Image: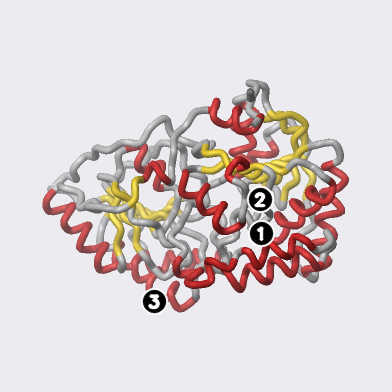
Amino acid sequence: MPSDRPLEHVVAFCESDTHAAMIEAMLDRGIAGIEHVLATGTFDRLARLNIPVTLLPAPAGQSPGTAWVLAQEVAREMLEGRQLLQFQDQGWTAQAVSMAAKAMGVPRTLVQDGYLTFDTRRSFGARRWLWPLTARLDRLPLTTPRPRRRVLLNRLLYRNHFFGITRPDKALVFGEAMKTRLRQQWGIPPGAIHVTGPLLRPASLQTGYAAPDPGQPLRVLFLDQCFLRYGRMDRSDWDERYLPLIRALSAYELTVKLHPSQPEPEVGDIEAAAGKKVLIAGRERLPEKLDMAVDVAVTVSSTAFISCLATGIPVIFCDCGALDVMPAFHHPLIKNCSASHRVEQALETFRNSGTFPANTGGEPLEDHLLLAGDKAFMSALQA
């Protein structure tokens, strides 16, 4: 039987402020005894925690092989006699750290951070069934070329949908949909995948909403995403679909919530598309419940939509050509649109009728997003 004791002797891997918030939550709630943090950068939230932090070498200016070796050298020093906790394993450095832990026989746990089970047909196509080819590379020696070959092959097969690529010993995921994805894509045993829901979560999601004031402009929140930096959208789609969506939304009382990692050149693109009258909100991570006065939110696939649903704010997902295509969810506060003009039609319907034009069918949201409590995390970590 799983115990109620926290996971002990843990080294956590941190790549973002969201990861820092998850580390903070685990410490505050007594979920994991995190003794050390391996980080790819400096994060203010980490600095407030009373645990040592070791910065991994920056890969910029180094060959991939050199960056891999340096990251593994640092990781090996920290991981002796401990466990590794990661919140994503898709990046080059994250994979290097995970492979170092595997070579040492260190237990590896992957906790889903916010990367949803997107509709991946745009990335996979017929290639989605070829994941056993990558499993063959597990038989190669645990040396630098082995994971590099696997990464290259997986980029051919799956482009940027790599969550779970390191085949961790244990994975804690948002819902059954991600559990199925990890089993099918990477061959992770079902007993190693635990459905716990998100760590950073609201208590519940709403199904009702407040109709917009017919005498006032419609208040729209746009949840920005960092697509170009991570290769999840082509420049042509950014220029011809993403930015035009923001321009279309500027006809309303628009607030743009910038992604925390959005580079300055792309911020300039967004500000130019939004216009001078639009409010550009900061880069801070949104709380579990939204504290902004808005009628409706629009995004491509930002998981910040969870905060909106927790507050009773309807969400419109717009396909702008990104690799991450949000599935159509059957939920009274969710609408999927195929293009920006469809978003405008939905917003006009909402403004004029006061009724949100939600999807009439689709997948149950609960299959992708279970709201469980801390006991689910404690049980899964000790399983």
Q: Residue at x 44, y 38 (%)?
A: 370
The percent position of residue 246, horizontal first and vertical second, equals 35, 65
Identify which residue, 358 or 158, lies in the foreground: 158
The residue sitting at 36% across, 45% down in the picture is: 365
Residue 77 drawn above or below residue 185: above
Packing grade of label 1 (10 A; few <14, some 14-19, many >=20) is: some
Q: Which mark is residue 91?
A: 1
* Disc sitting over residue 240 in the figure: 3
Mark 3 vs mark 1, CA separation in Å: 28 Å
Q: Position of residue 185 (x, y in %)?
A: 57, 59
Residue type for callout 3:
Glu
The label nearer to you, 1 versus 2, is: 1
Few, some or many residues within 10 Å of mark 3 (<14, 14–19, 20+): few
Drawn side of residue 311 relative to residue 52, left or right: left
Q: Which kind of residue does numbered mark 1 sit on?
A: Gly
Give the image location of residue 228, x and y in percent: 53, 68
- Give the residue at mark 2: 15
Frontmost residue, 253 versus 356: 356
- Tell me if residue 157 can be seen: yes
In which quadrant of the rendered image does the N terminus lie? Answer: top right
